[in-house]
Image (cartoon, rainbow, N blue to C red):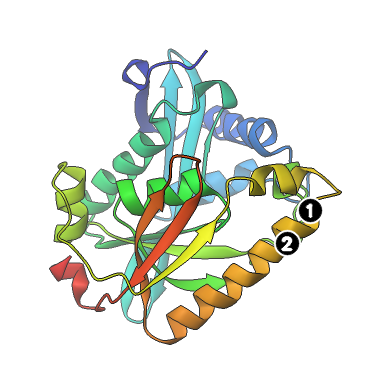
């Protein structure tokens, strides 16, 4: 049974015990072995060098977290949200979104304009959250970002990742978070992900289908980004299939939406 998100408190994590709990949550969510899990000391570092470690609490128990590190690229300081995890029993209750919003509030208070993170292009629900509900845009694709993964959720596929750019106070993000519709945009290309990909990834006999979709979408998205397009929308149909919607987005749009 999923706990309603209204019963969950979000606050910063600062103690070694809290950080140790984040390690345990990783194991419960992804089933990593010791080679892939982020150790406690990295949470300590993130908290002490200007990053973020936010926890979602059910009473006194941490049931999810978000961890970010400070970054700098092309003259712009930003926060890279490296990991967000919510225990399976608390999924689909809006807790992941609340953790992201807490990160945004803290980042704005400290003067950041941009947060980024990577996500799996085959994860339909996550893509929908990042793009449709939070207002991130995407202009970069990295094949096999982390190398091989020990998580069974990856299904043995390369760890391809898209970069979400979240311009924290742009009209696009602010209006979306306030429930206002985004102005119509011209969509020039769609790249789709079938909902069956989850089943294919976990079935050794069908895994080649997931690999084919991943490879085809990698080529399509990288080519689109090379042409100057960006992911500016995401759609899900009644069967749960997802589609990246690509169009133009100017780099100055952090102020224009």
Q: Residue furthest front?
A: 238
Mark 1 residue crowding within 10 angstroms, few (<14) / some (14–19) / many (20+): some
Q: Residue at x 27, y 75 (%)?
A: 249
Q: CA distance from mark 1 to mark 2?
A: 6 Å
Relative to 171, is 62 on the left or the right?
Answer: right
Instruction: Identify which residue, 6 or 65, lies in the foreground.
Output: 6
Q: Determine whether the residue tagged by mark 1 lies in a helix, strand or loop.
A: helix
Instruction: Identify which residue, 173 or 44, lies in the foreground.
Output: 173
Relative to 211, is 193 on the left or the right?
Answer: left
Callouts 1 and 2 close, C-beta under 8 Å:
yes
Q: Which mark is residue 20?
A: none
Q: Position of residue 185 (x, y in %)?
A: 22, 67
Is residue 151 visible from the viewing direction of this image? Answer: no
Q: Position of residue 170 (x, y in %)?
A: 17, 61
Q: Residue at x 80, y 50 (%)?
A: 206
Q: Position of residue 113 (x, y in %)?
A: 24, 62
Q: Determine whether the residue tagged by mark 2 lies in a helix, strand or loop.
A: helix
Q: Which mark is residue 211?
A: 2
Q: Residue at x 38, y 17 (%)?
A: 4
Mark 2 residue crowding within 10 angstroms, few (<14) / some (14–19) / many (20+): some
Instruction: Identify which residue, 139 or 198, lies in the foreground.
Output: 198
Instruction: Identify which residue, 62 or 244, lies in the foreground.
Output: 244
Residue identifier under label 1 = 207
Question: How many numbered discs, if any?
Answer: 2
* Position of 140 relative to 119 (above/below): below
State the quadrant of the C terminus.
bottom left
């Amino acid at each position: 049974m999923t706990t309603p998100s209204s019963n969950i408190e979000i606050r910063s994590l600062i103690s070694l015990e809290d950080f140790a709990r984040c390690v345990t949550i990783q194991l419960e969510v992804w089933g990593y072995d010791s080679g892939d899990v982020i150790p406690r000391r990295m949470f300590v570092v993130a908290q002490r060098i200007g990053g973020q470690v936010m926890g979602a609490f059910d009473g006194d128990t941490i049931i999810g977290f978000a961890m970010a590190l400070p970054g700098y690229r092309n003259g712009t300081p930003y926060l890279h949200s490296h990991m967000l995890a919510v225990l399976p029993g608390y999924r689909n209750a809006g807790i992941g979104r609340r953790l992201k919003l807490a990160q945004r509030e803290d980042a704005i208070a400290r003067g950041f304009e941009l947060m980024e993170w990577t996500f799996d292009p085959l994860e339909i629900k996550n893509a929908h959250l990042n793009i449709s509900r939070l207002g991130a845009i995407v202009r970069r694709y990295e094949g096999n970002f982390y190398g091989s993964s020990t998580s069974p959720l990856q299904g043995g596929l390369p760890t391809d990742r898209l970069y979400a750019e979240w311009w924290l106070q742009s009209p696009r993000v602010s209006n979306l978070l306030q429930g206002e519709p985004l102005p119509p945009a011209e969509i020039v290309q769609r790249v789709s992900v079938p909902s069956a990909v989850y089943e294919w990834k976990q079935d050794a006999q069908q895994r080649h289908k997931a690999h084919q979709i991943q490879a085809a979408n990698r080529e399509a998205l990288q080519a689109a980004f090379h042409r100057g397009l960006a992911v500016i929308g995401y759609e899900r149909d009644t069967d749960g299939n997802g589609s990246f919607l690509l169009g133009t987005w100017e780099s100055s749009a952090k102020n224009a939406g």
